[in-house]
Amino acid sequence: METKKFLQRALGEDGFYCVFASLRLQDRRVQKFYTSIDAVLTKAQELDGAGFDAYFALATFKEDGSRKVNNVKQLRAFFLDLDCGPSKDYENQNEAMLALRGFCKKLDLPRPTLINSGRGIHVYWFLSEPVSIEEWLPIAERLKQLCVEHKLLADPAVTADAARVLRIPTTHNYKTDPPTPVGFFGTDMSKPMHIDVFKEYMGTTLIPVPTRHIPAGSNAVMEALLGNKKNTFKDIVDKIKAGNGCEQIRNILVNQEEISEPLWRAGLSIAKFCEDGQKAAHVLSRNHPEYSIEDTRKKMDLIKGPYLCDTFDEFNPNVCTECPHRGKVKSPISLGSRIREATEEDNIVEAPSIDLPNAPINTYTIPAYPAPYFRGANGGIYTRVTLPDGEVTEKAIYHNDLYVVRRLWDGELGEAIVMRLHLPKDGVREFTIPLTAVNSKEEFRKQMSMYGVAVSKMDEIMHYTTTWVNELQANSMADEAHKQFGWTSDECKSFILGNQEIFGDRVEFNPPSNQTIGLFPSFEPKGTLEEWKDTVNFYNRDGFELHQFVVGSSFGSILMNLSPVNCAALHIHSKESGVGKTTAMSAGVSVWGRPEDLVLNQHDTFNIKMHRGEIYHNLPLYMDELTNSSPNELSNLAYQLTGGRQRGRMTSGGNAERYRGDAWKLLSVTTGNTSIIERISMAKAMPKAEAQRILEVKVDRLFNEAEDKEQQDNFSTALNNYYGTAGKEYVQYVITNLDAVKKLIEDVRVKVDTGAGLTSENRFWSAFTTNTIAGLMLAKRAGLIDYDVGKVFKWAISLLKQNKHYVSDMNASVEEVLNDYIHEHWSNVLWIKSTDDLRKQNNNGLDSLVVPEALPRGKLVARYETDIKRAYLIPKPLKAWCGEQQINYAAFLEDLKTKMNATKAKMRLSKGTHMQLPPTDVIVVSCSIEESDEARGIED
């Protein structure tokens, strides 16, 4: 028997179909709406395969997103649910089947279609045509009543519930271990019948089911509160039995044969507006002399509302004067009034999220409130307390849904809570408040009012919130507040982007932390995804491979989480304007948010730039115009940036280390008018290590004509209007295809390393290029860009080869290093001949002096004998200079010995002069020092 055929017979033809599912072990629920039965089946099979218990709603609905009775459009079946099991109504399915067979025989009902729910039995009688809830409900109520009369133990909550869900055949019941298949009993389905035919089987004229009574002129808040009310005649009777009820109703029940017709009608007015009013009407009426089903129906049709206590007193005086409820209630119906508590299905709510971009419709599962609080069927907060005398009192606290989602721990701010507020027209708002505010009346009122909670008695909401906190503290651990954007773990299960936590199949609210809250507005999207795609397509042309490469670095940055390298960088330099360096970075960062906020510039300090790296975590770090940075600052930037960590610092005003987040793993792009490596070489002899960490590319002018400038200006303007829409789509694509992404990255890495001949010392270049090319390929597969990635790859390989050639030329010989040292310390060297000294005392010793070519000015670092070209170097200043130049002193000294035959000796450096310096340790090396232009200008 086909499930599709079953659903076609059970469901109406017009409106939205609903699939509901729950994953018990993870406390997850899903509710989706569709316009076709095929879609219902597909989703049910998908959920069943994922371990969910899958259900379908027996009605179709007028509007998408709401499975409420007042949204029901059509029904096409009557149904029963027979529970089976050791603690259920029936011991087993055989016992339930025998009872059902007897019930059908008594009423001469046709054979129903039976579904094995895994433990119980679902019973269906199909209708030949869909009907409205107004036609369906009285008959369903009559069916429920007949089940009671004939002792068929069907679940009374199911039979007349128009919004009920039941299990879908060919799925599984995961409440059993192992899961039990849900299927059909038998191979043939029962034949559909007209509703009038089924009505005849019910055997009597039906009493109309009363509708909810709302006083005229009620405002929206009052209507919401009344919508949660239900009146039960049984509760009125229970109070009468306990001696705390209405004497007027007791009198009508006990003395039916004697009471007046007006008093009888007054009793019916109470029954009509109770949920069990149909049954109550007959209980109140069956012994009255004028009773008949038709007369009872007519009387109830004419009743507009429940009669007041004063009316009862008028019809039957001297009874209400002794009532303990006198002055406390206006009508006996209040004694049967209680709050309609939300069911598991009621707690599945679809609504737009105020906080998330473009207010997407999300499915929210509202948790059970901590006792004594509970949620009304239509929302709101209520409390229920049982008094010592057994009486139950209920009270409305707040008419909207408001609850605590989770606890957060922030190492700097302490504990906080995330709350969720459902506003009827706006949607769902989530917000974070510190626990210190929860325990302060004034601060709590301020916080609640700021986020839209408007009540007169805020202390009741405060007590309710405190109860929530205590409940969560007793049953769950606090979550760590996310202090960085990007991936939440190495497994790449979710990604933090502003106030969004992006999963593969959904987006949840990410509460702010002290570190991230300031950047939340920067990630609010602007424009549509299609508008952004059209904008970045500006680069989709020949000659713009660099710009496409920069955009690719934005996509590739979040792939660095899968790389052994923390960070790799690209520096773009050109002395000319019109290159589009800054605009390319703006285009790249527009994937995630507002370019003018997320691209750092020359006015931002070094510490700010590193702090942003920490906060961005996996997002690309773009820094514009490093031209005026000092060589040492650029060298530090190269090491710290690619190292992935901020420098350790103490907190201001405290003896504690400042918070440092996890190491960042990202791609960075910088720009300037000059090469970073050339700038560093001004302070460092061989900046080879920095060059291996930062790829560099020099670019020429691209835009010359006025027309080109206008295009560039329009492009820049568009980037400031369309941004932040592609990031979510890209992240979800990566999450849902993670295994394929990992394989792609490895395949690209092999091609990059092979194509450019890279080795382990080129690992930073490899990581940048690999993840950028992989990012472009993934973005193209996700439908976000349409660049020719093959051309970009060829351009990148050429760039790598250029950088490799440049670095290979950077290796300086030991002679060059020694020359650099001597030239840099020219004025601190004693330049002198070696042929004479002061031991010859001719002409009063004056002729015996060896006149130096240049006396040292300042601290002496070396002696150089110009005639024999031999240098005597003092080790200490040489070692200090090597440290400043980041040259390995021990390796340099070894090169001097092995390549230039240097030796160690002890000598008096001032020999041959009037200076009387003591002997000192020196390094003796023969070398030819060419005099520089600067040195020639030094005076003797």
Image (tube, rainbow, N blue to C red):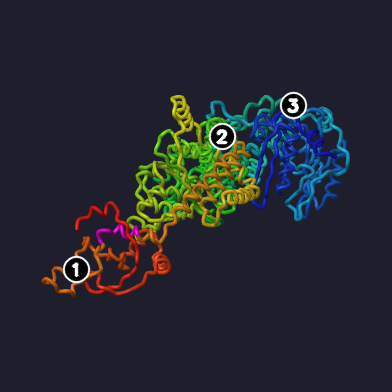
Q: Nearer the viewer, mark 2 or mark 3?
A: 2
Inter-mark Cα distance, 1 to 3: 138 Å
Inter-mark Cα distance, 1 to 2: 105 Å
Looking at this view, is 677 or 622 the one in front? 677
Residue tagged by mark 1? Answer: 913
Q: Amino acid at mark 1?
A: Thr
Q: Nearer the viewer, mark 1 or mark 2?
A: 1
Helix, strand or loop status at disc 2: helix
Q: Is residue 319 visible?
A: no
Residue tagged by mark 3? Answer: 295
**Would you say the residues marked 2 and 3 are in contact, meaning their CB atoms lie under 8 Å apart?**
no
Q: Residues within 10 Å of mark 3 (few under 14, many from 20)?
A: few
The residue range painted magenta reads 819-828
Above or below, 605 against 312 in this view is below
Residue tagged by mark 2? Answer: 224
Residue 451 horizontal/vertical position (percent): 46, 39
Helix, strand or loop status at disc 1: loop
Q: Amino acid at mark 3?
A: Asp
Helix, strand or loop status at disc 3: helix
Q: Earlier in the sequence, mark 1 or mark 2?
A: 2
**Would you say the residues marked 1 and 2 are in contact, meaning their CB atoms lie under 8 Å apart?**
no
- What residue occupies the far front of the structure in this picture? 842
Q: Quadrant of residue 33?
A: top right
